[in-house]
Structure formats: structure tokens, C-alpha cells
Amino acid sequence: MSEPSRRVYERFEDLPILLVHAPERGRVLLRRLRGRRPLFVCTVAHTETAEIDGLSGAGATAELRRLTAAADVEALEHGRPICMAGVPSNPGGAPGPVIITLAGLRLTGLESVAIDAGLRVKPQAETLVVADRWGGSIVTGRAVPHAAELFARGLALAPSLAARADSLLLAESVPGGTTTALALLCGLGVPAWGMVSSSMPENAHPLKERVVRQALSAAGLDGTGYPGSALDVAAAIGDPMQPFVAGLAFGALPTTPIILAGGSQMAAVLALIVALARERGEPLDLDRLGIATTGWVAHDPTADLAGLVARIADVPVLASDLDFSVSRHVPLRRYEDFLVKEGVGAGAAAVVAALVAEADHTRLLAAIERVYEQIYGLDVAPS
């Protein structure tokens, strides 16, 4: 079987950053952000949608997927998870993307904030708790009944976070989140079938479509439009992260550049932001807004992030051009097989490391390998 051809994107200057969508707007945003120090904000949540077998590779079993978000938060604070050995890993053996995030944050010295928007397993780490319940399965048609409250809390918190930095990187850790992203996108009338990415190389599009069509039916939606508010759609078939991060972005955009740190999941948040702005009759400054992800998402042969975002808004999509093919660690090289791809703001953290610390391919990979070796107790001499 021949290897799929890689999509070709323009590069931003001499840095390992790809301009995936709206390149001119992307250049303007990157030049605005270059040398600035953003605040990294990671919102974590659990959705029972992740417990449907076959949907998520963010943990080998449903039990481990319940630990993933907590372990990611612990790693951000302590340098390694407390609730499990190692980091949350794909069943195929690739370590979770928090190792990339940690390396990016260490290269730049950025401050990070973790926000609990509804976890089933609480981390042994400091979090700002904004919800006391996690999300239900989207197939119930009432997955996040408190979506409007989550949006309001994000909106209220935004000014204080925006005041702490030049810009905000809004990241997430929500296993099963590409399926809830597909549901929210289709519920908002964005035809996203077959376009969202996955933490698994084969991408379970048929299963995702069956689950999402069941969710749409349960919610009384047909995938072409919706009555009421966009928050009603999120309440029916979303996950807790989506309305909260939409609130953060909506509240901060008037004064602060925002990078939605992720792939398909942040495309769904973008769709929610755009829909709410339209409902409220409020303008969106698209020059302050972008999505940043990894090259594995941008090149994913089973998805189309650029095409998906083009159906939502003329917002730039940026990608860190990470390359693990020459890593000395086999589990890291599995990323090149399109395992894992993104999460915990990995792509955005690497993009900012290039912008702020001028980290090139070699320096990025070396920093990521050091994090991996420290977490797994590997005594490897520098090559």
C-alpha cells in the first residue's frame, strides 16, 4: 500500500510553522504575536461520549480515558502525571501530546492555567473549577444542559485572564472530543462529515457518523440548521469544554489576540463563536483570531481541517512543522504514522516556541525528547 501524499503548505519565514489556511491573515497574526508572551490556558473536561468503544485513542480503555485529562493537568504542573505511570498514551504506543506541550512551555517559560470544566477524575494539581459535573453522552440529546452557564462563566473570566498576558492560547484536553466536535459542527449546520481528525490513524468516520446521527436525531436536529440558540445545540450534543472556551474567546477578543490551540475540536469552538456573534449582532475581529495545531493534523490524510475552517470563517490555521521521523525513541516516531496528532495545545505550544524562543526543528525535537526521557526515567546520553 502506497503512502498518502502529503499536502504542501507555505512556511512562515524561516520558522517551522506552516500556513495551512488564510495564509496572508496568518502572516499578519504571527508577526503580531512574534516575541510576545501569551498565557497558556488549558480547559479540561470529561464527556461520556468517550466511553463509546472505538471513538477515541486517548487511552487504551474507557477507564484509562477517564484519567487522561487529569493526567494532562498533573503533567503541566508537576512535569509528569501523578494518577498514572507515564503519560496518557495511544493504544498504538505513541505517548500523549502533553510531552510536546511541556517542551514548548519550558522553551518559552510561559505561565499556564488549568481550568476544570467538568472532570470525572480530579487531578492532583491546581485547577480553577468552573463546573461540578461532567458531560453526558451526545446520544442522549442532552449532553451539557448547563452549556449557557459555562459560556457565561467563560465570558466573565476572560477579562482577568486577558489582563495577564499579551495574548491567550486556549487549549483543551477532552477525550472523545473529535466526535463531539463533529456533532456540534453538524448541529450548527456546518457539513463536517468525514472532515474531522482523530487520535487514531484509520479514523473511525463510519462509527462517528452513526453516533452523531443518533445524537442529532435525539436532539431533534437535522444537521442543516437549528432553532433557538447555538448554545442550545452545544447543550444537546456538545461537550463542556466547547461553550466555556467559546465564552473565554468571545470575552477576550475585543482586547486580546486569541489562538485556539487544537485541531478539529477548536474548529467546532470557532463555529460556536461565529454562530453566537451572529445571534448577538456583535462583530468579530478575525484579525485577532487564529487556530494553531500540529502538522500531523494539517497533513492528516483522513481529515481536512483547512477545508473545514473555510466553511466556518476566514480565520488563519497555523501548524507546527514537527518531525519525529529522526527521533531516537520509537514511540515518538509513531507520530509519523498519524497516531495521536494533537491535544493539550501541543501544536500551539510548539508554534509559540518557534515565535518566542526561535526554536527550530532540531531544538524542538531535543526538548520534546528530554521531557519524554524525564517522564519515563530513561538515561539517554545526548546524541
Image (cartoon, rainbow, N blue to C red):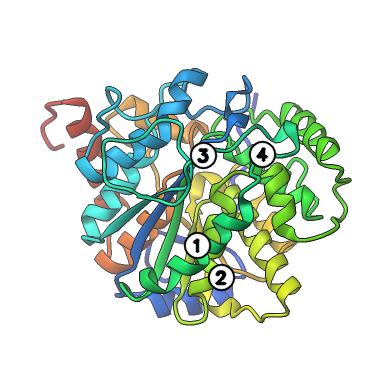
Residue positioned 85% across, 48% down in the render: 223
Name the N-terminal-most of marks 2 and 1: 1
In contact (CB < 8 Å): disc 1 and disc 3: no
Q: Amino acid at mark 1?
A: Gly
Name the quarter where the C terminus is drawn.
top left
The residue to which callout 2 is attached is: 250
- What crowding class fits label 1: few (fewer than 14 Cα within 10 Å), some (14-19), or many (20 or more)? many
- Of callouts 1 and 4, which one flags the residue occurring earlier in the amino acid sequence? 4
Q: Residue at x 62, y 31 (%)?
A: 49
> How far apart are labels 1 and 4 at the CA level?
18 Å
Quarter where residue 5 is shown: top right
Q: Look at label 4 and name its amino acid.
A: Ala
Nearest to the eye among marks 4 and 3: give it. 3
Q: Which residue is mark 3?
A: 133
Residues at discs 4 and 2 in contact (Cβ within 8 Å): no
Residue 60 higher or lower than 264, as above or below: above
Give the side of residue 375 with respect to residue 144, left or right.
left
Work out which quarter of the rendered image holds the N terminus and state it.
Answer: top right
Sooner in the amino-acid sequence: mark 2 or mark 3: 3
Measure how far apart labels 4 and 3 are at the Cα level: 11 Å
Q: CA distance from mark 4 to mark 2?
A: 22 Å
Instruction: Compare residues 225 and 361 and report the one nearer the observer.
Output: 225
* Location of mark 4 (residue): 143
Give the foreground label among 2 and 3: 3
Front disc: 4 or 2: 4
Within-10-Å neighbours for mark 3: few <14, some 14–19, many 20+: some
Question: How far, Cα to Cα, is label 1 from label 3?
Answer: 16 Å
Mark 1, residue position: 154
